[in-house]
Amino acid sequence: MNHAPLLAMALVAGLALSPSDPGVLHAQEAKPPRMAPGVYEVTLLGVASPERVQELTQNIIEAQRTNPEWFQNYVLEHGHSGEVLPWHQNLGLTREEYAEYLEIADSWDLSPVGQGSLEILKDGQRVEFIAGDELAALDGAVLDLQPLRLSSSFGDCEAFTQITAKAGQKPEPWSGVNCRATLRDSPFARTLVFSLGRLEASGDLFLRFEGKEAKNGELTRQADLFFTIP
């Protein structure tokens, strides 16, 4: 299992959707699936990808480590519209390799890798996540349902999109909500991705929580959580 493709795609893909993007609904319009309070044993999911994707991804990661401040500024400058970042030689790939990477980068999959513990507390329109060690980055995060807003240790996110189930989604078609945010508070820069939905086939809840924090261009912490809740 390898999370590298998603790490690199967090650098390459636009990390925040503009409020003017037609795919973004106002927070009060996006509707997450219902969550029942309780303590759950969740299934952790890991990322698997072809060797070629991992090879190109590693080149991007090494380039990012060589020039972290440039990467941070490039993502913040060009990652505001939800579009894929334009090619640049500092990305660590040739123009041809970058085109190949964008074409095959989605050929990854999610599969079970373990179990974790999650408690969901609900108080009116407020949902709080109490997480075990395997999901520590999510511990204490709060999802306000009206208006829809996520507060977490990686910052807040409120530009939610409504997701409709369709073929090709990972780990299987699901519908729910998604939010992306890019936050800058010098010398820190943070990115956050949060998805909450219901899987079409099994009916389980699916939660994705990705956070990255850099200080002066150097990555200081990150979280890549994918799991299902029965």
Image (spheres, grey):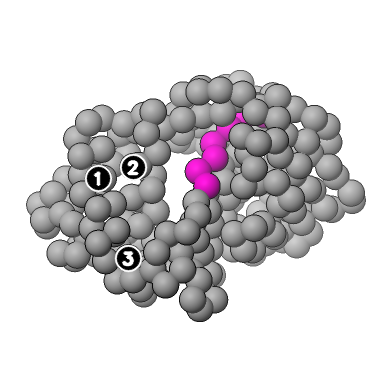
Residue 49 falls within the magenta-colored stretch: no
- The amino acid at mark 2 is Pro
* Secondary structure found at label 1: helix
Q: Which residues are magenta?
A: 223-229
The residue at the point 10 percent across, 52 percent down is 96
Q: Which residue is mark 2?
A: 5
Of residues 50 and 65, the one drawn nearer to the viewer in this rendering: 65
The answer to whether 55 is drawn above or below residue 26 in the figure is above
* Secondary structure found at label 3: helix
The answer to whether 39 is drawn above or below residue 99 in the figure is above
Q: Earlier in the sequence, mark 3 or mark 1?
A: 1
Q: Using a 10 Å C-alpha cutoff, classify the residue at mark 1 as few (fewer than 14 neighbours), some (14 to 19) or many (20 or more).
A: some
Q: Nearer the viewer, mark 3 or mark 2?
A: 3
Of residues 57 and 95, the one drawn nearer to the viewer in this rendering: 57
Q: Earlier in the sequence, mark 2 or mark 1?
A: 2
The residue at the point 61 percent across, 29 percent down is 228
* Image coords of residue 136 (percent x, y): 64, 43
Q: Which residue is mark 3?
A: 68
- The amino acid at mark 3 is Pro
Of residues 218 and 1, the one drawn nearer to the viewer in this rendering: 218
User: Residue 58, which numbered label?
Assistant: 1
* Image coords of residue 13 (percent x, y): 36, 56
- Label 3, label 2: how far apart the Cα atoms are: 18 Å
Q: Quadrant of residue 50?
A: top left
* Image coords of residue 214 (percent x, y): 46, 64
Q: Marks 2 and 1: CB-CB under 8 Å?
A: no
Relative to 125, 15 lies left or right: left
Give the position of the C terminus as an image quadrant.
top right
* Secondary structure found at label 2: helix
